[in-house]
Image (cartoon, rainbow, N blue to C red):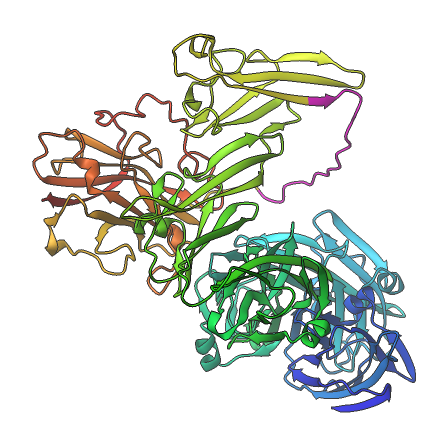
Amino acid sequence: MTLQVLSGSAVLHGIDTICLGNVMRVDVGPLGGKLLEVAASINNSVVVITPSLASQCGFRVKTEKPGNTMIYASLPNCFAQNVEDKMFTTTLQLRVHGNRFAEDELYQVTETCHYTAWASREIICNQNFMEVSVKRAAPHDYTLPKPSIPQASGQSVTSRRAAEKLPIDAGFRLTTVVFFTPAGEKTMSVADAHRNGYGIGNTPTRLVLRSPMMAPETYTQHFAGVTMRVFKTSIIFEKKWLASQIDATAACPMKEGSVFFTSDTITWYLPRQIDPMISSEHFNLLEVHFGLDGQRLNAETMHARQYSLSLNDLYIVVQIPIGAVGGHYKSHIQQNQYHVSYVIEPMLEMLWAEDSPHEQTRYKVLFHIATHLLPRPLQLVDETVPAEQVFKLVLGHFALDVALINISFPSEVLTLTDCRARGFNIMEHISVNGSTKIFALQVPFTDPAVSKMGDGVVAYSLHLTFGLLVLDSFVTFSHTAHVEAVSPNMALPPSVSGGCDHQNFYVLVKYGSQSFRFQTTVGKQLLTPSLAQHYNYMENGTHFSFTVPFSASDVAVEAVKSSSIRSRLNVVLSNPETKSEIQDFSLVCNFPSGLTECFPNGTMTALAVKVDSVPALNPRLLTLQDPTCGPVYSDDHYAYFVFTVNSCGTTRKFLPDSMLYENEISLPDELEMKPGSDSEEPEYELKISCIYDINTSHAVAFYTRLRRSEPYAENSTGLLQIEMRLSLDNFYSTFQTVEDYPIAKYLQQPLYFEVQLMGSTNPKVSLELENCWATQDEDRNSQPRWNLIINGCPNPVDTYQVVFHPVQADSRVQYPSHFKRFEVQMFAFAEGEDDLNGQLFVHCDIVICDAKNPLGGVCGGQCPNPESSARGQRHVSDFHDFSHVSAGPIIIN
């Protein structure tokens, strides 16, 4: 590489180039917040690489990593100097835009890459373009009559084979491009194709075609469930009385159907055999390589980073841990709440042969993956030691693209320079793996921003707000904090604080002095180890935290609005001996929720929520204006209604330009509390409405195409084996064996069951529990019977309800959808049973579902209306026999 500084006083710290097979990569950075402009230099001319020119000429500029830019260039790009398709030289001009106090910096980078391992066909899939280059054989005397326009098949075998032998450079001229799509053929001249953004080039030995990824003449097609973008053409060469054509096809994967996320893993599926690019029945996959950012990784590096690459009959499967080295976190701000996504760009490179070992295709995919937004509530850790007379605060964790820009106090706002001048110590610490960072702040107790209270024993207090910036998007956000410190001889009680995002309450409890012993109550429940695990409890030496979903039973609903629900979480810290309260903390948040939906077909849906002001309300008893119209689903907290605008007592009003439909959710008249009545039943009224425009019409574009083939179903046979086991602990790491039965358990002990679909490697199916129950006899039809799970949901009348445990992928669990785990309290079998003989058998009905198309019911993961006839019965005698498993006996002591 040669680097020349053309202008500017500063020299960029890092410019490096790497030749990666048929791709060159230029790494630039760090830029320090400045902007980078990329241009190509050829024949004493400089051309700025715009996004449209990049996709046409084989370039991509990637600025994902904080302060760094990667420039990808295909070796036969539009501006490369090509020597016999063996040596490629590309010259780039990089302009780093300064600010008003500094001039721009201009650099010229020249790199020569040598590449001789050309396959007969090479395909590159980048984020913004697809490229296919086809080898042309050595000149040979061969002519053929001028062909007519290609037929619907898109190729003529005779002309294609002839083109491989034809000396294209010997007087032949590239004239026409024919694009093939499901809608038909489209013919363009080469000049028109260039004007439309396509790149077409003729190198000494190869034909190169390049298409923007979403060009109009490309189309989507599904292969083994993965959506691919397809570019299919024929290139026609002509000279007097003669013509020939070369076919070129590329297919590149899209995210739909190929990328799946769990809480800690990314799984990427690429079809092993991509039909549009394979014209022979003799397919032999020769090589598969994995890499990052276009660069191959060896097996040792992949193992160290916990990447995995595997092949089966249909797919090449890549698994990447979220947060692994090689990717990075990207910051996002929503309503001043901090979120991150994990971004990584894996590469798969395949080499296969068709017909003969010499007809090889090299296929390289540089695939950009970004996870969904992951909430990352910020935590302020107080590491203050009062005896040192300094507040020591740590705020984090952030992705590397966040900068601290100022700190606000009640009376002033200070820049970082101002803070350091005041004697504050501000530090930035990056984690060992380089993926996150924290900001540390030290403020002396003597600073004017610190409040002091007390005589003799002094309490110090500091209110401050951190001003933060996401560098690449220039989005600002803030985090407000209040910390206190007291003299060492003064006991500090525990304290509780918290915040919310759009789905959860986040609670932080500080321990205080060691002399304080306390217990925590969440809502109306004591924070037991089981409940703590349910709420993702985490702790260290100074504090603990937990997360409560806004739909949890411990959350009280205060008010319901059309677009949000105001909910309250009560957290009480109390002395376990005296039962006196140490702190009563209430966290009130508004959660976005559309309670009423209006559909174009005249269907209305409404959600009625039990509010704290009517604690005696039973949502199951609510109806619409027509008392016969009850909820389609209800539980102790919600009632959900679905009805049409011409039913259930819905009224209609004509407005000038619209029509208003109204209904009301309430208790039936006989259940409403009458004035002066002693009844404990509450009053409840919720008005719902939908407005439909009268004179508005909507245009919908669509097109049809003929079916290319009749659908068919392929018959197959096989066995699905289900196993239910009893775990020794709630980590599901060790299990009881068959030889251990019967197993003795005490009433206070929980039972941890795991049900597994055995022998299946299909990630598209899921195992669901429809019904689970216990009997005293091994016969699953015997009585008495204790219902544990009904229609996929815990028995709502059971005092000790079943608790479902999530299943995460690990070394034993390859497909989490093939497992179900649940916990049963032994007390569930003792309540009200005088004739319990001390022996139990647990049975489950199993349903196997399509995970990609669950349809509804148990497969859809939604509990049906619990008002069915079987709901609420401790013992039932009628049930439907599905595929089932059993475990037992279990002896109760």
Residue 708 in magenta stretch: yes
Magenta range: 691-709
Relative to 241, is 877 on the left or the right? left
User: Looking at the figure, which quarter contains the C terminus?
Assistant: top left
- Tell whether 245 sits left or right of 877: right
The x and y percentages for residue 631 are: 47, 22
Q: Quadrant of residue 426?
A: bottom right
Q: Where is residue 645 shown, x and y percent of the image? A: 62, 17
Looking at the image, residue 873 sits to the left or right of residue 561; the answer is left
Q: Is residue 892 left or right of residue 865?
A: left
Residue 277, position in %: x, y? 62, 63
The residue drawn where x is 42% and y is 34% is 857
Residue for point 67% across, 79% down:
22
What residue is rendered at 75% in x and 78% in y? 76
The answer to whether one can see residue 457 in this image is yes
x and y percentages locating residue 814 in the rendered image = 38, 60
Say whether residue 83 is visible: no
Picture quadrant where residue 784 is located: top left
Residue 88 vs 804, above or below: the answer is: below
Q: Furthest residue to the right?
A: 44
Compared with 332, 570 (above or below) is above
Of residues 73 and 593, the one drawn nearer to the viewer in this rendering: 593
**In magenta segment, residue 400:** no
Snapshot quadrant of residue 91: bottom right
The prevailing secondary structure element of the residues shown in magenta is: loop
